[in-house]
Amino acid sequence: MSEPLRIAIIGTAFMGRAHAHAWRSAPAFFDLPRKPEVVLAVGRDAFKTEEFAGTWGIPESGVDWREAVARPDIDVIDICTPGDSHAEIALAALAAGKHVLCEKPLANTRAEAEEMAAAAEAAHAATGALAMCGFSYRRTPALSYARQLVEEGFVGRLWQVRAQYLQDWLADPEAPWVWRLSSELAGSGALGDIGSHIIDAAQWVSGHRIEAVSALTSTFVDARPLPDGSRGEVDVDDAAVFSARLTGGVLGAFEATRYATGRKNALRVELSGTEGAIAFDLTDSNFVELYRVADGERAGFTRIDVTQPGHPYAEWWPPGHALGYEHAFSHQAVDFVRAVAAGEQPRPSFADAAQVQAVLDAVQRSAAADGLLTPTA
């Protein structure tokens, strides 16, 4: 390997841990042109951040992300904070000529996302800095394989896309309040948190972009318990459903909810076309289901185990050995390092992520308009 790629992780909660694990694991299994090294962890609490750094073998910790951006020995700013700080950190990092990996959704508003995309384009032209948004499910091997099959024409002309992301961690009305339930911190609720994933996945796998939406959202519980015994306001959506028109006349149906009782983390994408269909379910993430119209009376969905040598990201284990949730983050790190080393734009770019943010914005505006028609004469 040539000179290391020195990284500062900003944010040390769940997503910070996922990224720290990925940066450490990726070079152990993949042949990378530069070795990623996390040299600094930054969080709000000095003690917890120092503890985080010790756990992951990170030599330094701090509480001011601005110091990380200003350091000449840091190449990459990895943003794992709540959405309300994404824009400020990313804009500063890009202005300083740093490469940026930012968790999804890119921002809390369409305006912020568009500003970030413009800044990324300008920074690349000025300093060669590159920016990517972390839609990690793109790096699930079975979903990557589904995209390959679509590109090869497996489904023929695409008719419809269906995408769901179902969770139930808020189905208990007394589940505690967390920052994801604040519009100021998170921008939106289930829509931005998990809906953004299925928007990106459906568009990426199908090769078609959403052009128009018709949406409904709902907040089922408007206040939840705080540690002091009071209740915190919930001012984001708990669930969002919307229909969509995609390029080429493709129809889409989307659902994102935290109230799907019994569903813990069920992301599903299905595509139907003239020649066949493809279905992926994250709860069975090493498999993709394929249906061929040409098989006639013998046609039926066939499960393909995407762990063979020719499949995406197959360097990990012998054939048939399953991969897990955490591997998508390692694959994300692999793709980011390779793109940066080659001076090529990693995907999804900030521009790609800003387009997803535009869809989120359209869904919110459609739901707010409440253009419902009653089924009466």
Image (cartoon, grey):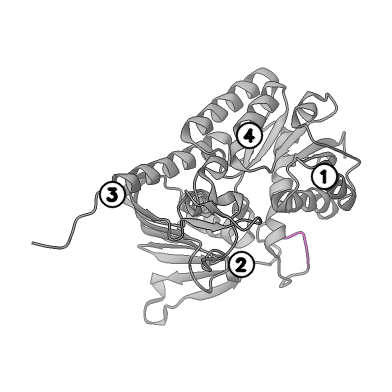
Identify the amino acid type marked 1.
Thr
Q: CA distance from mark 2 to mark 3?
A: 36 Å
Magenta-colored span: 313-317
* Mark in the foreground, 1 or 4: 1
Q: Residue furthest bottom?
A: 298
Residue 286 percent coordinates (x, y): 63, 68
Look at the numbered disc 3 and give the secondary structure of its residue. loop
Look at the numbered disc 1 and give the secondary structure of its residue. helix
Q: Is 211 or 62 nearer to us in this picture?
A: 62
Q: CA distance from mark 1 to mark 4?
A: 31 Å
Res. 345 mark: 4
Residue indicated by mark 1: 49
Q: Earlier in the sequence, mark 1 or mark 4?
A: 1
Vertical placement of residue 350 versus 369, above or below: above
Residue indicated by mark 2: 285
Identify the amino acid type marked 4.
Gln
Q: Earlier in the sequence, mark 2 or mark 4?
A: 2
Quadrant where the C terminus sits is: bottom left
* Mark in the foreground, 2 or 4: 2
Mark 1 nearby-residue class (10 Å; few <14, some 14–19, many ≥20):
many
Q: Residue furthest top?
A: 126
